[in-house]
Image: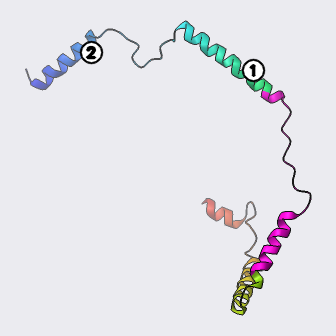
Amino acid sequence: MHPCIRALIIIGAELLALPASTGFAQTSAPASEIDQLKQELRRMQERLQKLEQAPPAPAPAAASTPLIPVAALAICLLFLSAAERKNWIAGGIALAVGALIYAVPRGSPPVAGSEFERREAT
């Protein structure tokens, strides 16, 4: 007999001789484990109900005085007072370029059903 056929017959016989088992099927857990899981589920549900019924925590109040913006402005003025003339010129140019980029309209967004959307869909 050919060795491959003989090996297949032996493997088939061994597979048939194996006891029937659940294999990868899910086996049932012991009753005590199920009871423990049920108790844990009840505790979690009770905790969730308590959390849902609790009043929301108040949001932290913001400072009533504009301390942070005033401090930031003072620091910026301090830095600007130490700047040289070429830094002022470079900053002004950068500000002008940024303002132009911001002000130039880039076109309107595509409208639903517009030709742009029809071209993109095909």
The segment highlighted magenta reads: 51-79
Q: Nearer the viewer, residue 46 or 8?
A: 46
Whether residue 57 appears in magenta in the rendering, the answer is yes
Q: Position of residue 113 (x, y in %)?
A: 73, 60
Q: Position of residue 122 (x, y in %)?
A: 60, 60
Q: Quadrant of the N terminus?
A: top left
Type of residue at label 1?
Glu
Q: Is residue 14 left or right of residue 61?
A: left
Quadrant position of residue 73:
bottom right
Q: Position of residue 80 (x, y in %)?
A: 76, 82
Q: Is residue 116 above or below residue 38?
A: below
Label 1 neighbour load within 10 Å: few <14, some 14-19, many 20+: few
Residue 46: which numbered mark, if any?
1
Considering every residue shown, the one lying at the far left of the view is 1
Spatial separation of the CA atoms under disc 2 and disc 1: 50 Å
Residue at image location 84% in from the left, 67% down from the top: 69
Q: Which residue is mark 2?
A: 15
